[in-house]
Amino acid sequence: LHRSRPSKWQVEVLHLPYGCCMVLGIIGNRKPASSSSYDDVTCFGWCNSSAVIEAGSYQWFLGSWDGWQAGDRGVFTYSPSEATLSLRLLRGGGVREFSIHNCSLPDGAFIHLYFSKEVT
């Protein structure tokens, strides 16, 4: 992602298998030490459970987040100058907005997609 200006991307969840762990967001570490990359202190994103990952730590029920569902579309915006990752969730004709602040990644950020099982 660009280091000085905002970046936007979109994700659509077509199918989410039962028992799958999924995290969508950003990460600053290209090669995280753990296979569970969402544990990395440079990871920020939203899980398919009601958890939000902030700096590699689970935060539960943050901002009424209730997890990803099949059919969801998410539009992400990362603003390095504001150190903010935003998600515009499009679900069933409605729109919900979520933000994670203080996600400063001075060495750069990468789109982060973590799946414990195969998803589409």
Image (spheres, rainbow, N blue to C red):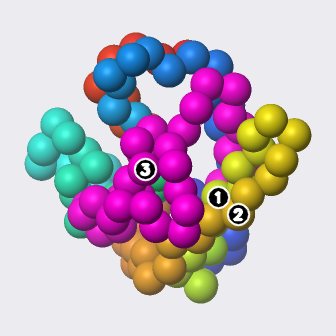
Residue 37 image position (x, y, % from top left): 25, 45
Q: Which residues are magenta?
A: 47-76
Q: Residue at x 64, y 19 (%)?
A: 14
Q: Earlier in the sequence, mark 2 or mark 3?
A: 3
Q: Residue at x 17, y 37 (%)?
A: 35
Left or right of residue 77: residue 90:
right
Mark 3: amino acid: Ser
Circle 3 SS class: loop
Q: Residue at x 54, y 38 (%)?
A: 68
Residue 47 in the image: above or below residue 28: above
Disc assigned to residue 50: 3
Residue that carries the numbered disc 2 in the rendered image: 97
Residue that carries the numbered disc 1 in the rendered image: 87
Mark 1: amino acid: Leu
Please identify, in this view, whether the residue under mark 2 or under mark 1 is nearer the observer: 2
Please identify, in this view, whether the residue under mark 1 or under mark 3 is nearer the observer: 3
Q: Earlier in the sequence, mark 1 or mark 3?
A: 3
Answer with the quarter of the image where residue 85 lies: bottom right
Please identify, in this view, whether the residue under mark 2 or under mark 3 is nearer the observer: 3
Q: CA distance from mark 2 to mark 3?
A: 15 Å
Residue 28 image position (x, y, % from top left): 36, 61
Q: CA distance from mark 2 to mark 1?
A: 6 Å
**Image marks 2 and 1: residues in contact by CB distance under 8 Å:** yes
Circle 1 SS class: strand
